[in-house]
Amino acid sequence: QVQLVESGGGSVQPGGSLRLSCVASGRTYSAYCMGWVRQAPGKEREGVAAIYRSGGATYYSDSVKGRFTISQDKAKNLLYLEMNNLEPEDTAMYFCAANTQAEWDGHCYTAYNTWGQGTQVTVSS
């Protein structure tokens, strides 16, 4: 079992930056991939970034590509999301997520089964 806790959210002006962190505890080695998913009122849930634990391959949604960077420190059980050049459209609750399943349908980052509590990111003037 894996537990996830996010931090680092807050309010920032457009063009600013934030660094989100997610600490994982429990059987962290069981996560095949981890990522960040955001949810804003009235909008579809969007997986913005993901990383495979073993090889470090990454995925980014088109909406954040070139602005966000996902990284991990496996030794410290930490997952990061560096968010640069933030836009008001990035305002959302950001969730850390993991896929610990032995098998799944589709991409690993579309089948998360473990979630953090979320951290709010607000981008406004």
Image: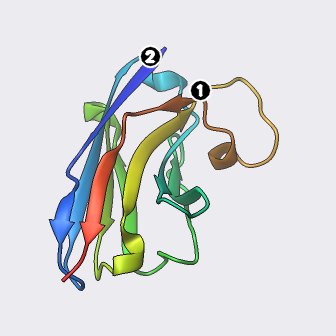
Q: Is residue 87 left or right of residue 7?
A: right
Question: For numbered disc 1, what is the local secondary structure?
Answer: loop
Displayed quadrant of residue 85? bottom left
* Frontmost residue, 82 versus 72: 82
Image coordinates of residue 107 in percent, x first then y, are: 73, 49
Q: Is residue 19 left or right of residue 27?
A: left
Image coordinates of residue 37 in percent, x first then y, are: 50, 52
Question: For numbered disc 2, what is the local secondary structure?
Answer: loop
- Residue 109's tag is none
Assess disc 2: are there few (<14), some (14-19) or many (≥20) residues with their C-alpha within 10 Å of its C-alpha. few
Assess disc 1: are there few (<14), some (14-19) or many (≥20) residues with their C-alpha within 10 Å of its C-alpha. many
Q: Quadrant of the C terminus?
A: bottom left
Ranked by sequence position, the earlier of labels 2 and 1 is: 2
Report if the CB atoms under discs 2 and 1 are less than 8 Å apart: yes
* Frontmost residue, 52 versus 106: 106
Residue at label 2?
27
The residue depicted at 39 percent of the width and 52 percent of the height is 94
- Residue 100's tag is 1
For the residue marked with disc 2, what is the amino acid? Arg
Displayed quadrant of residue 82? bottom left
Colouring style: rainbow
Image coordinates of residue 55 in percent, x first then y, are: 54, 48
